[in-house]
Image: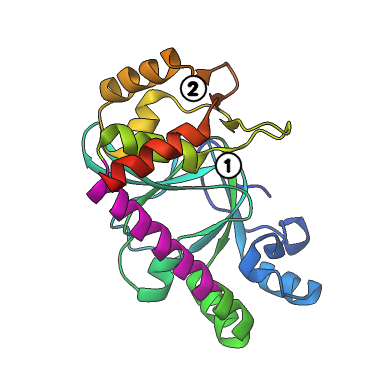
Amino acid sequence: MKANATTGSVLPLPANSLPTLRGCAIFAGLSPDEDREWLARCHSRTLSAGESLVDFEDMSKDVFIVQTGEIRAVLRFSVGKEAILGSFKRGDILGEQSAIDDMARSASLMAVSDATVTVIPCIVFHDILRQRSDVALALLQLLSKRIRAMNDRLSELSFLDTKHRLYNTLLRLSRVRGDGGRERIISPPLVHAELAEHIGASRETVSREMSRLAREQLVERTSRAIVLKNPVELSRRISRALEG
């Protein structure tokens, strides 16, 4: 059986119909037999766009691997006010913090698009870590990487004003266009409200600055992407702001 996409209900599935755990980097060293063994103790869940996977301060301890779609971690401060902590796509693991420290969820997890996740019960996750030291080490390396990224975000908030935080976020979320040029793209494009949530600013402030960047021909928005026409100049402006 499949999970109910409308209600987000969780139903067990036979192991041979589940995606592999090895698509997640920390489980890459599992053998096919180990993969099947652990999957037999997991289940899948499907979510519709906008549906909650877990809520802030929820006491559940399951760990999730994104198989399709995108899941976002957010902190909500009040109605209409939230900060995006991270976005997770195919192969990403999330929810591991509560499984490790046995505390409530530190953020809400929400499906940005229709999504499917593999749900690893906490007890299964602990069993894997006890039996596979390489998985435990890979998890530690991932957590260390996330701490470094968080430190970078804290530095950004401490030392950069709003417009330079926007430049930094555009660069961080973008990827090389792939045509051999210097341009970078964010695809699919984020709306201004989403960019505002990333940098802790209002949508109006982001809209004004994006319009200015468009007039300066540094940024172009199409139906499919935000195009950074001159990422080197954006980096240069960030460096000048930090030096000043």
From the viewer's perspective, tell me whether residue 49 is left or right of residue 132.
left
Point 73% across, 34% down: residue: 180
Magenta residues, as a range? 139-160
Point 51% across, 34% down: residue: 231
Q: How many marks?
A: 2
Residue in the foreground of this view, choosing between 172 and 128: 172
From the viewer's perspective, tell me whether residue 240 is left or right of residue 223.
left
Main SS, magenta residues: helix
- Residue 24, given in percent of the width and then of the height, sits at 64, 61
Point 57% across, 36% down: residue: 114
Please, what is the three-letter code of the amino acid marked with disc 1?
Answer: Ala
Mark 2: secondary structure: strand
User: Which numbered disc covers residue 219?
Assistant: 2
From the viewer's perspective, tell me whether residue 151 is left or right of residue 94.
left
Confirm whether residue 4 shows in the render. no
List the single residue furthest toward the top: 215
- Residue 178, given in percent of the width and then of the height, sits at 71, 35
User: Which numbered disc covers residue 115?
Assistant: 1
Confirm whether residue 91 shows in the render. yes
Residue in the foreground of this view, choosing between 156 and 24: 156
In this rendering, the answer to whether 231 lies above or below 25 is: above
